[in-house]
Amino acid sequence: MSDSPARPSVGDEAPDFTLRDQHGQELTLSSVRGVRNAVVVFYPFAFSGICTGELRDIRDGLEDFQTDDIQVFAVSCDPMYALRIWADQEGHFFPLVSDFWPHGEVSRAYGVFNERTGAAERGTFLVDREGRIVWSHVNGPGEARDFRDYRSALADLRGRS
């Protein structure tokens, strides 16, 4: 599994980051603080089978991941240019952000960087408007996510708002 520092827990402040998306634009998690909830979705590799399926699930259900109330950040350690090609090929019109350099720094901050593979593990973190983690789940290698759990956690968060 991961050789990263401990994962932040529910109730912890989410580690902030500024990363470039597939278009070279800098995106900062704290820029949505006070305005929107956020979901930070780490995945190992663009163009790989499970990751392609998972990001298609986000794309095809984008109304659950990116609204006036929530912003998705899909994070991998792939270079920005690879993410651009993949986004264009797959029709991903949401931020694919590159944790390429310093390699895996944000993945490490979230405790999901795997030193052996040089990639993020499949971690999902729901962050409220105050910047606190309210739900998280990390899947083991080769295990696809079930986004129904995320949708349920988001519904609970909306119910508290």
Image: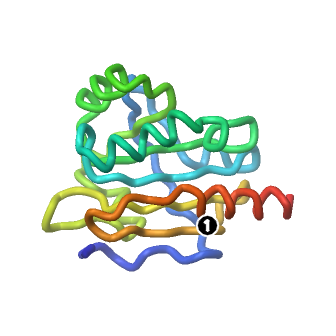
Image-based side of 133 in relation to 78, left or right: right
Instruction: State whether residue 148 is above or below residue 75.
Output: below
Figure disc tally: 1
The quadrant of the image that shows the C terminus is: bottom right
The quadrant of the image that shows the N terminus is: bottom left
Identify which residue, 71 or 151, lies in the foreground. 151
Image-based side of 10 in relation to 114, left or right: right
Quarter of the view holding residue 108:
bottom left
Q: Which residue sits furthest left?
A: 116
Q: Is the residue marked by circle 1 packed among few (<14), some (14-19), or many (20+) residues within 10 Å?
A: many
Report the residue at 59% width, 36% height from top.
62
Image-based side of 132 in relation to 26, left or right: right
Q: Amino acid at mark 1?
A: Ile
Instruction: State whether residue 86 is above or below residue 1.
Output: above
Quarter of the view holding residue 148:
bottom right
Identify which residue, 86 or 118, lies in the foreground. 86
The residue where tag 1 is placed is 133
Indicate the position of residue 32 as horizontal and vertical percent values.
Answer: 66, 44
Indicate the position of residue 11 as horizontal and vertical percent values.
Answer: 65, 75
- Helix, strand or loop status at disc 1: strand
Image-based side of 93 in relation to 32, left or right: left
Indicate the position of residue 31 as horizontal and vertical percent values.
Answer: 62, 42
Report the residue at 65% width, 65% height from top.
132
Report the residue at 74% width, 43% height from top.
69
Instruction: State whether residue 45 is above or below residue 120.
Output: above
Indicate the position of residue 51 as horizontal and vertical percent values.
Answer: 33, 47
Instruction: State whether residue 39 is above or below residue 86.
Output: below
Quarter of the view holding residue 105:
bottom left
Identify which residue, 155 or 78, lies in the foreground. 155
Identify which residue, 154 or 4, lies in the foreground. 154
